[in-house]
Amino acid sequence: MIRYECLELLAPRITDQLVVTSQSGQRIEWGHLCKHEGNLLLGEMAAALGVGIGLALALPQRRVIVLESDGSVLLSLSTLATLANLDPPNLAVFVFDNETYSGTRISEPTATAGKTDLEALARGAGIARAVTVQDLGSFKKEGVPALAEKGLRFIVCKVKESLAHREIPRPDIDLVENKYRFVRYLEQTEGRPNPFIGRG
Amino acid sequence: MEAELAKRIVDGLREAGVNFVTYLPESRLSQILALMREDNSFRLVPVASETDAVSIAVGATLAGKQSACYMECTGVYVSCYHLLVVAEHLRVPVLLILSHLGGFDDQRNSFHYALAGVKLIPHLEALGIEYKVLDNGENLGAKIKNAVRTMNALRLPVALIFTGEFTV
């Protein structure tokens, strides 16, 4: 299975969830597949999970979806312990583990290509409902329902490295524009203004 | 720190609208934690690393909270990547509540802390983070309000650095 196939299954099922993406390829692929105003296409390593936790804690009535990668999670392992103990029941984390740092010019192995097991790390941190899926059938069974069901979910999706994102046009909004679109969407759907936006 | 000062910090944060505080415990200002824990105005969020403190606070701010990160000043070194690529890149205000362990006016300074302390201000300046050093409780509430107003106006993190009387 490749990441794009998984994202194709998730994208049409997004309604009012908030979706935070991590670095590079998945950001491009998700931005292409899903034009949802509740997307926050962060594109920074080691940050999406933390931002997603903050959203989930502040908006317990909303389902928050974090799309992460193996390299990004490995860079911020402390977040697993923080997440486990906060245990937000409205958060689902998908980690697309291609065992590779897959940039525009590199394809180098991550630690998960060696001895490291992200599901075991998550369980060891205290995340009870951590699973690994290896194929699309398992992804449909374990992954897709996590978009809507209650409870903290941590789904490690073992995927082959794919270069599909290099053929897709990159999102044409920058991070600050994306932030304002995201915050305005939240203001509209939550029915209250965000204090930091304020008045001019 | 005298109990009265701790209470005034917490009062000041509440009156400035701060309602979401991520933290990694430290030694100089720690009395504020118990006060905030007893106060329903605050959602307190313990973290395992200051990196988490920053990114979680950013998420909460985007969701409409007025967020702060309470940490030892060394937490700025740990979290500088997240301050830069998340909070500053996205332009999201977060109040940094920093104890200036190892600074000139740290009343409990020692060889363990001094080097980390003297590098704080240059580090914040390199990151482009506006800051105010507070060494006593004069006009404390107003200074906290000013910091919150400034960070919201800039849409950037702003730091309050607590030293002097706050480090006794």
Image (tube, rainbow, N blue to C red):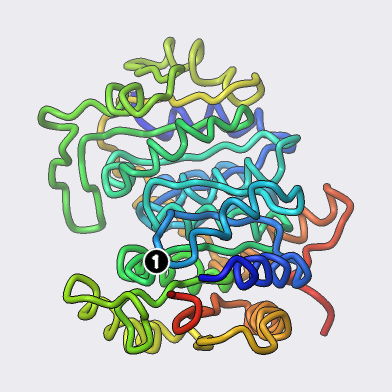
Q: According to the image, label 1 marks what residue? A: B72
**Residue at left offset 60%, top offset 56%:** B21
Q: Residue A74 is drawn in which quadrant? A: top left
Kind of element beneath mark 1: strand
Task: Specify the subunit that label 1 lies on.
Answer: B
Whether residue B76 is situated above or below residue B128 in the rendered picture? above
Inspect the image, locate mark 1, and give the three-letter code of the amino acid beneath it: Glu
Closer to us: B1 or A58: B1
* Residue B113 visible in rendering: yes
From the top left corner, tell me how far across and down residue A12 is, in percent.
64, 31
Closer to us: A151 or B31: B31
From the top left corner, tell me how far across and down residue A160 is, in percent.
26, 30
Whether residue B111 is situated above or below residue A12 in the rendered picture? below
In this view, which residue lies farthest toward the right?
A191
* Residue A35 visible in rendering: no
Closer to us: A147 or B40: B40
Q: Is residue A4 left or right of residue A107?
A: right
Identify the image quadrant of the C terminus of chain B: bottom left
**Residue at left offset 38%, top offset 37%:** A80
Whether residue B167 is situated above or below residue B31 in the rendered picture? below
Closer to us: A78 or A46: A78
Q: Is residue A84 left or right of residue A186?
A: left
Question: Pointer 1: residues within 10 angstroms few (<14), some, or many (20+)?
Answer: many
From the top left corner, tell me how far across and down residue B35 is, in percent.
64, 54
From the top left corner, tell me how far across and down residue B112 is, in percent.
19, 70
